[in-house]
Amino acid sequence: MVPQEWAKEVTRLLPAGRLAVVEESGHMVPYRQAHPLAGLVTGFLAHECVAAGAGGRTGPPEQGPAG
């Protein structure tokens, strides 16, 4: 939900950047285009899980106790 030209530039600069444009949704993507958005998120997560390898951790690093 940023200007498309800025999004294209940031995508180009990121090592594995990907850009998805969900047409006819404005700022209400989850409400107006829920199924296309869900497909994009599912595809992204599936790709990241495969990239991490079998049994690989895909989330943020675990943190020890605060203190």
Image (cartoon, rainbow, N blue to C red):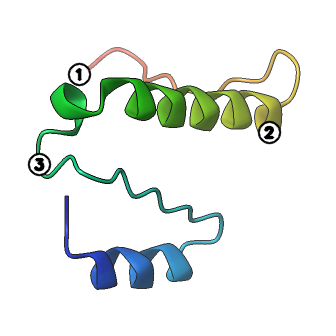
Q: Which mark is residue 44?
A: none
Q: Position of residue 14 (x, y in %)?
A: 54, 73
| Residue type, mark 1 in image | Gly
The answer to whether any part of residue 18 appears in the image is yes
Q: Between residue 14 and residue 18, name the one nearer to us.
A: 18
Question: Mark 1 or mark 3: which comes first in sequence?
Answer: 3
Q: Which residue is mark 1?
A: 67
State how far apart marks 1 and 2 are (Cα).
34 Å
Residue in the picture at 56% in, 61% down = 18
Q: Secondary structure at mark 3?
A: loop
Viewer-closest of 22 and 57: 22
Classify mark 3: residues with Cα within 10 Å, few (<14), some (14-19) or many (20+): few
In the figure, is residue 23 to the left or right of 20?
left
Residue 60 in percent (x, y) is at 49, 31
Tell me which corner region of the image, top left, top right, bottom left or bottom right, holds residue 3: bottom left
Mark 3 highlights which residue?
27
Please, what is the three-letter code of the amino acid marked with disc 3?
His
Depicted 18 relative to depicted 6: above or below: above
Q: Which image quarter is the C terminus in?
A: top left
- Disc 2 is placed on an element classified as helix
Farthest-out residue, right: 54
Could you tell me if residue 60 is visible in this image?
Answer: no
Instruction: Tell me if label 1 and label 2 are in contact, CB under 8 Å.
Output: no
Q: Are marks 1 and 3 in contact (CB under 8 Å)?
A: no
Where residue 32 appears, as percent x and y from the top left, is: 19, 32
Tell me which numbered mark, 2 or 3, is placed earlier along the sequence. 3
Residue occupied by mark 2: 51
Please tell me whether mark 1 or mark 3 is closer to you in this view: 3
**Tag 2: Cα neighbours inside 10 Å, few (<14), some, or many (≥20)?**
few
3D distance between C-alphas at marks 1 and 3: 40 Å
In this view, which residue lies farthest toward the left?
27
